[in-house]
Image (cartoon, rainbow, N blue to C red):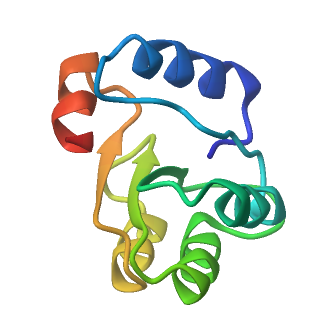
Amino acid sequence: MDDHFMVRMGLSASLNVEPDMEVVAEAANCEAALAACRQHHPTLIIMDVRLPEKSGAETTAAILKEFPDANILMLSTHSGEEEVFRSLQVGARGYILKSAMREELLRALR
């Protein structure tokens, strides 16, 4: 989940070539993310920390309220963002920087 189309496309393209991964949905905001979760029941969600309307932490909390077993990995530009810590406090499983190498992302997801 990211509000930037190019980020979503890059993540999808990178993950869909992995034999053990499949991107089942993409979303640009909280409401779209909740709708996608209701439809697809994903096992893992990659969530941007900074989103329009509702923050990544608020969106994470909303998803976990409805889907308590969801695994959410936060995606952030900066490691010291307060929003990252808020997201972890509401139940995100971890975070990774947008500057991370592809292999780092795959390790974090697995």
Residue appearing at x 30%, y 44% in the figure: 96
Residue appearing at x 44%, y 46% in the figure: 76
**In the figure, 21 relative to 24: above or below?**
above
- Residue 19 coordinates in the image, percent (x, y): 30, 18
Residue appearing at x 59%, y 64% in the figure: 56
- Residue 75 coordinates in the image, percent (x, y): 44, 46
- Residue 66 coordinates in the image, percent (x, y): 61, 85
Which image quarter holds the C terminus? top left
Classify residue 108 by image quadrant.
top left
Residue appearing at x 65%, y 62% in the figure: 37
**In the figure, 47 relative to 16: above or below?**
below
Residue in front for this viewpoint, 97 or 24? 24
Relative to residue 5, is residue 1 drawn left or right?
left
**In the figure, 27 relative to 15: above or below?**
below
**In the figure, 28 relative to 91: above or below?**
above
Relative to residue 110, is residue 20 drawn left or right?
right
**Residue pushed farthest bottom?**
65
